[in-house]
Image: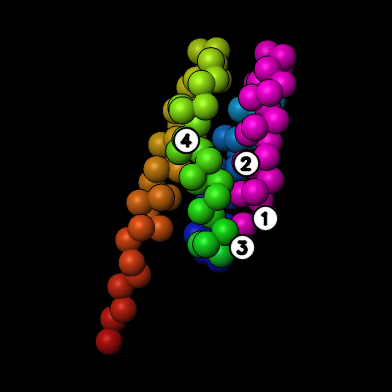
């Protein structure tokens, strides 16, 4: 649950800002896409629950959306945070005896 909370705290506000920016720009399709990811992230309680929003964020560039400069900066920061989180999730926990 710790990672899910960290993900919400680190990525959530950036997604909220991106969603507001896309709304201002009139990019309804992109806004809807990221709002769905935001809801998925918000409902994540365990590491396994993070897989879907992280995967969706990591494939954002393949969706083919075009973004304004302002939105692009936010996307880059979100993808950076999502990549760090994905790396953490791939690293198996170390057991100390």
85 with respect to 9 (left or right): left
Q: Secondary structure at mark 3?
A: loop
Q: Which residue is mark 4?
A: 59
Q: How many marks?
A: 4
Dot in front, 2 or 3: 2
Say whether disc 4 or disc 1 marks the residue closer to the N-terminus. 1
| Residue shown at the point (41%, 36%) measured from the top left | 80
Categorize mark 3 by other alpha carbons within 10 Å: few (<14), some (14-19), many (20+).
some
Say whether disc 3 or disc 4 marks the residue closer to the N-terminus. 3
| Residue shown at the point (65%, 21%) measured from the top left | 21
Q: Secondary structure at mark 2?
A: helix
Whole-number angstrom distance, CA of label 2 to CA of label 3: 14 Å
Measuring from the top left, give residue 32's x and y in whole percent: 70, 30
Q: Which mark is residue 45?
A: 3
Specify the segment rendered in magenta: 21-45
What secondary structure is the magenta-colored segment mainly?
helix
Whole-number angstrom distance, CA of label 2 to CA of label 4: 12 Å
Q: Secondary structure at mark 4?
A: loop
Is residue 31 covered in magenta?
yes
7 with respect to 45 (left or right): left
| Residue shown at the point (41%, 50%) measured from the top left | 86
Say whether disc 2 or disc 3 marks the residue closer to the N-terminus. 2
Q: In the rendered view of the protein, which quadrant contains the C terminus?
A: bottom left
């Amino acid at each position: 649950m710790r990672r899910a909370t960290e993900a919400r705290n680190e990525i959530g506000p950036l997604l909220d800002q991106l969603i507001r920016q896309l709304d201002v720009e009139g990019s309804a399709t992109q806004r809807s896409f990221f709002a769905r990811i935001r809801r998925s992230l918000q409902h994540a309680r365990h590491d396994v629950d993070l897989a879907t929003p992280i995967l969706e964020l990591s494939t954002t560039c393949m969706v083919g959306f075009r973004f304004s400069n302002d939105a692009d900066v936010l996307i880059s920061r979100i993808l950076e945070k999502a990549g760090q989180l994905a790396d953490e999730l791939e690293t198996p926990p170390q057991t100390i005896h």
